[in-house]
Image (cartoon, rainbow, N blue to C red):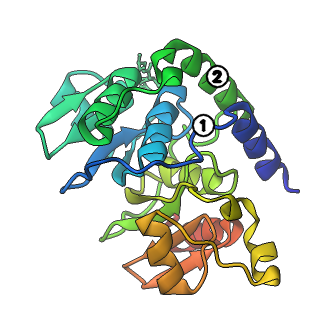
């Protein structure tokens, strides 16, 4: 296993059951939520975990250290460079503070009681800091790139060890994208895609993005990147990383 995936797996294990399973929100936002985010920031991770758990999509606006594309927008709108920063065009809410954002998402869209683990939010923050430590500076430092014209789309769930390096690179390159949430809802989804294919298993899913991907590509494997600029659709983290560097690397 390449070391990149091994340390990503450590982050996944540290976060245990967080950011994997979905129980879709009662109400889905009409307009995409916007999240100003830094991939390996422990606070931003908590918000992305909640997005997976509520099955909410969002436009991710990457703000690595030294970033110039989206960081200034946060300072202008909110008054300081602090991440995560959520903008909800549906309600006009704009907010800092990861745990406030998580509570807001559960209340506004989940329309259910905040799960106990999120009420012990400080513990989640400590756990997320440990997960960040495993990835050192990955996904936090700027890497210059060309800006795509149209938003890329990444099918991902937060704790996927393979999707993480893709999100890190998108963040470093300051490439904005639509995060298509693809949490798991069925036991069969825990079987890795190659084995599923070998056994002829096609898991049912309650998740719209998983069902769309199955229809579009005939299988579900995470991560999956769709680039409307080139009309390329790619599975396999290694291939997606190479594609992003070749297509948008400065
Ligand atoms: N209490 C805040 C803490 C957020 C925070 O400290 N974020 C760091 C990144 S991990 C930050 O914005 N640092 C400033 C910067 O990166 O410029 C929360 O939970 O959202």
Q: Is mark 2 within 8 Å of ligand 1?
A: no
Residue at screen point 64% across, 30% down: 132
**Can you give x and y, in whole percent of width and height, for residue 103 in the image?**
34, 26
| Residue 201 vertical position relative to residue 102 in the rendered view, above or below | below
Q: Quadrant of residue 222?
A: bottom right
Element type at mark 1 = loop
Residue at screen point 40% across, 51% down: 24
Q: Which residue is mark 1?
A: 18
Category of crowding for the residue at label 2, using alpha-carbon neighbours closer than 10 angstroms: few (below 14), some (14–19), many (at least 20): some
Category of crowding for the residue at label 1, using alpha-carbon neighbours closer than 10 angstroms: few (below 14), some (14–19), many (at least 20): many
Residue at screen point 47% across, 63% down: 206
As measured in the structure, the alpha-carbon distance from the residue carrying label 1 to the one carrying label 2 is 10 Å
Work out whether residue 134 or residue 81 is closer to the camera in this orientation and state it: 134
Q: Which residue is mark 2?
A: 127
| Residue 137 vertical position relative to residue 161 in the rendered view, above or below | above
Nearer the observer, disc 1 or disc 2?
A: 1
**Can you give x and y, in whole percent of width and height, for residue 247 in the image?**
51, 74
| Horizontal relation, residue 225 to residue 5: left or right | left
| Horizontal relation, residue 192 to residue 36: left or right | right
Work out whether residue 219 or residue 130 is closer to the camera in this orientation and state it: 219
* Name of the residue lying farthest toward the right: 1
| Residue 208 vertical position relative to residue 115 in the rendered view, above or below | below
Work out whether residue 108 or residue 94 is closer to the camera in this orientation and state it: 108
Element type at mark 2 = helix
Per the rendering, the mark at residue 248 is none
| Observer able to see residue 208 | yes
Q: Quadrant of residue 150?
A: bottom left
| Observer able to see residue 38 | no
Query: Is mark 1 in CB contact (under 8 Å) with mark 2?
Result: yes
**Can you give x and y, in whole percent of width and height, for residue 231 in the image?**
42, 85
Q: Quadrant of residue 37?
A: top left
The earlier-in-sequence mark between 1 and 2 is: 1
């Amino acid at each position: 296993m390449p070391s990149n995936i091994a340390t990503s797996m450590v982050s996944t294990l540290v976060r245990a059951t967080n950011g994997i399973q979905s129980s879709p929100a009662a109400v889905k936002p009409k307009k995409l939520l916007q999240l100003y985010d830094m991939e390996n920031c422990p606070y931003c991770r908590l918000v992305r975990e909640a997005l997976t758990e509520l099955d909410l999509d969002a436009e991710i606006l990457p703000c690595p250290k030294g970033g110039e594309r989206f960081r200034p927008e946060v300072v202008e709108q909110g008054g300081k460079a602090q991440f995560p920063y959520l903008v909800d065009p549906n309600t006009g809410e704009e907010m800092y503070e990861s745990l406030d954002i998580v509570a807001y998402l559960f209340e506004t869209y989940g329309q259910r009681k905040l799960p106990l683990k999120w009420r012990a939010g400080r513990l989640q923050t400590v756990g997320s800091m440990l997960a960040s430590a495993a990835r050192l500076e990955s996904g936090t430092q700027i890497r210059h790139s060309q800006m795509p014209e149209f938003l890329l789309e990444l099918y991902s769930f937060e704790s996927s060890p393979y999707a993480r390096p893709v999100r890190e690179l998108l963040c470093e390159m300051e490439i904005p994208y639509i995060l298509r949430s693809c949490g798991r809802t069925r036991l069969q989804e825990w079987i890795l895609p190659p084995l599923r294919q070998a056994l002829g298993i096609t898991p049912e899913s309650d998740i719209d993005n998983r069902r769309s991907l199955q229809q579009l590509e005939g299988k579900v494997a995470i991560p999956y990147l769709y680039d409307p600029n080139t009309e390329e659709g790619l599975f396999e983290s290694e291939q997606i990383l190479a594609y992003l560097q070749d297509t948008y690397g400065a």
